[in-house]
Structures are given as structure tokens and as C-alpha cells.
């Protein structure tokens, strides 16, 4: 699972950088929160998940890691995509989807924490 997290992290890195570049060129910084979340939850967090799962293969090969991967990779684009649309259109009719995506990311984070406590051990 570590390699998958690292590869997807690289994709988020490019999206985050491109969004930042676009905001700088247009001098429209209304998407700053989306930019920050793509970089932090997409690039940085996922890269760290990947490195941890590579360093501790028992954790990376667990069912928890698989569920964490899918929750994070379905929740984050849902959360940030709908937030982007809400900021673009000034409409909050899809805020429920933003909340669902956020909850998916949070549940994934809790599963990651459980996985770390259960499977990240220098003796394994």
C-alpha cells in the first residue's frame, strides 16, 4: 500500500502546485483552503502514509491500510471537489457531500492511527 500512497501523493502535489500557480497568475486567492488541503492531506499526509507503510510492511499490507487508502482517496477528492464548486459558485447546496468526504477522511485517519498502534513495531 505504501507505493500506492506515494504515487497518488505525487498526483496531489502536482494538482496543489497547479492550483497555487493559477491563483497566483489570476491574483484570485479564493481557493486557498482547497490549495492548502490538497497539499497537506493529498501530498504531505499521503507521502508520509506511504513512507510509513513502506518502512513497516506489516502495517502496509494490513486490511486497515487498504480501507484507509480507499477512504482517503475517495473522501479527499469528494471533500475538496465539492468545496471548490461551492467556492466557485457561492452555493452551499452540496455542503452535505463536503461533509461526507470529510468524515471519510477522518475515519481513514482513525484507521491509520489504529494501524500504527497495532502494526508499527520495530520487533515485527
Image (cartoon, rainbow, N blue to C red):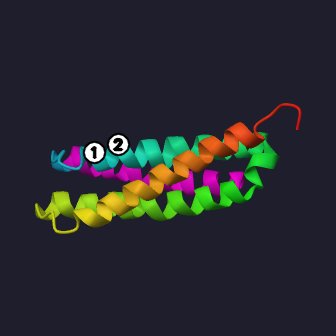
Q: Which residues are magenta?
A: 1-25
Q: Position of residue 80 (x, y in %)?
A: 34, 57
Residues tagged 1 and 2 counted as in contact (Cβ below 8 A) = yes
Residue 96: image quadrant is bottom left
In the drawing, does residue 115 fall left or right of residue 10?
right
Nearer to the camera, 14 or 90: 90
Q: Position of residue 72 (x, y in %)?
A: 51, 57
Whether 85 is among the magenta residues is no
**SS assignment for the magenta stretch, majority:** helix
Identified at 22% across, 68% down, the residue is 94
Q: Position of residue 67 (x, y in %)?
A: 62, 61
Q: For the N terminus, give its image quadrant.
A: bottom right
| Mark 2, secondary structure of its residue | helix
In the drawing, does residue 121 fall left or right of residue 94?
right
Q: Is residue 50 above or below residue 87?
A: above
Q: How many marks?
A: 2
Q: For the C terminus, give its image quadrant.
A: top right
Q: Position of residue 13 (x, y in %)?
A: 47, 49
Nearer to the camera, 91 or 29: 91
Nearer to the camera, 71 or 42: 71
Q: Residues within 10 Å of mark 2 (few under 14, many from 20)?
A: some
Identified at 30% across, 50% down, the residue is 34
Identified at 70% across, 51% down, the residue is 2
Q: Which residue of the protein is positioned furthest toward the right in this rendering?
A: 123
Q: Which mark is residue 36?
A: 2
Using the numbered discs, state the Cα–Cα distance from disc 1 to disc 2 in whole angstroms. Answer: 5 Å
Q: Residues within 10 Å of mark 1 (few under 14, many from 20)?
A: some
| Mark 1, secondary structure of its residue | helix
Q: Which residue is mark 1?
A: 33
Q: Which mark is residue 111?
A: none
In the drawing, does residue 121 fall left or right of residue 50?
right
Amino acid at each position: 500500500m505504501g507505493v500506492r500512497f506515494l504515487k497518488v501523493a505525487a498526483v496531489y502535489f502536482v494538482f496543489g502546485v497547479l492550483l497555487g500557480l493559477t491563483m497566483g497568475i489570476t491574483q484570485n486567492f479564493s481557493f486557498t483552503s482547497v490549495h492548502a488541503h490538497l497539499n497537506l492531506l493529498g501530498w504531505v499526509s499521503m507521502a508520509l502514509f506511504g513512507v510509513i507503510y513502506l518502512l513497516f510492511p506489516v502495517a502496509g499490507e494490513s486490511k486497515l491500510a487498504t480501507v484507509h487508502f480507499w477512504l482517503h482517496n475517495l473522501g479527499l477528492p469528494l471533500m475538496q471537489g465539492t468545496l471548490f464548486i461551492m467556492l466557485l459558485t457561492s452555493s452551499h447546496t452540496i455542503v452535505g457531500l463536503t461533509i461526507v468526504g470529510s468524515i471519510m477522511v477522518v475515519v481513514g485517519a482513525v484507521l491509520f492511527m489504529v494501524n500504527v498502534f497495532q502494526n508499527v513495531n520495530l520487533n515485527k
